Image (cartoon, grey):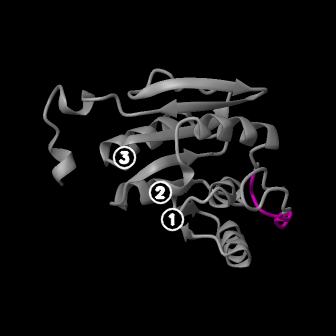
Amino acid sequence: MRIISGKYKGRRISPPKNLPVRPTTDMCKEALFNILNNNFNFTELRVLDLFAGTGSISYEFASRGCKPITSVDGDMGCVNFIRKTTKEFDFDITPIKIDVFAFLEKNKASYDIIFADPPYGMDQKDFEKIITLVFENGLLEDDGMMVIEHSKYTKLNHMENFSYDKGYGGSVFTFFELENGEEETGDEDDEFDA
């Protein structure tokens, strides 16, 4: 695994072989960050990386100057590896070991970019639950973007705040953005005050 751009471009990172992960390919990472690069100034971003795995996406954001970055994963081995790599590179990454859904339900902070890379075989309704929790709990900044990586067999373009999707081989990135003013229309929702 290598960092593809930024301050640490070309640096190789070797995670343990026993981690339960499927890292994003270099081709997909490059495509993703080309899109993000056209929309954001990385040095001003607060980033949330869900199902962070080896931390590959978090390191790309950190190498480009993002801070702070929060990396969430339910596997202790992954979290320990991210912690070790963060110390080695002096990244501003906070790894948290917690179930991603529990984190989304409890967390009060908001982010400019939320990236989620759940297991491709995860149930469709759980993919949808990630999106629902992010927007119901106000975790994405008004001008922010959420990106979910998934297989081409999972469809998320029917979900609220869907923006567009891009496919790369068997992988798809689906992008979500708050639609201007839409959150203020329709029925009042007292859950935001809870």
Relative to 146, is 193 on the left or the right? left
For label 1, the residue is 68
Relative to 44, is 77 on the left or the right? right
For label 2, the residue is 46
| Mark 1 vs 2, N-terminal side | 2
Q: Residue at x 67, y 36 (%)?
A: 34
| Mark 3 vs 2, N-terminal side | 2
Q: Which mark is residue 150?
A: none
Image coordinates of residue 44 in percent, x first then y, are 48, 55
In the image, what residue type sits under mark 2? Arg
Image coordinates of residue 183 in percent, x first then y, are 25, 33
Between the C-alphas of marks 3 and 1, the distance is: 15 Å
Q: Is residue 102 or residue 92 the one in the foreground?
A: 92
Query: Considering the image in quadrants, where does the C terminus appear?
Result: bottom left
- Provide the residue span drawn in magenta: 13-21
Using the rendered view, name the quadrant where residue 59 is placed: bottom right
Regarding residue 77, the answer to whether it shows in the image is yes
Disc 2 element: loop
In the image, what residue type sits under mark 1? Pro
Asked if the stretch drawn in magenta spans residue 44, the answer is: no
Q: Is residue 31 or residue 43 the one in the foreground?
A: 43
Relative to 138, is 67 on the left or the right? right
Regarding residue 120, the answer to whether it shows in the image is no
Tags 3 and 2 in contact by the CB under 8 Å rule? Answer: yes
Relative to 115, residue 159 above or below:
above
- What kind of secondary structure does the magenta stretch mostly adopt? loop
Disc 3 element: strand
Q: Which mark is residue 141?
A: 3
Q: Residue at x 47, y 25 (%)?
A: 163
Between the C-alphas of marks 3 and 2, the distance is: 9 Å
Image coordinates of residue 32 in percent, x first then y, are 66, 38
Q: Is residue 190 or residue 122 the one in the foreground?
A: 190
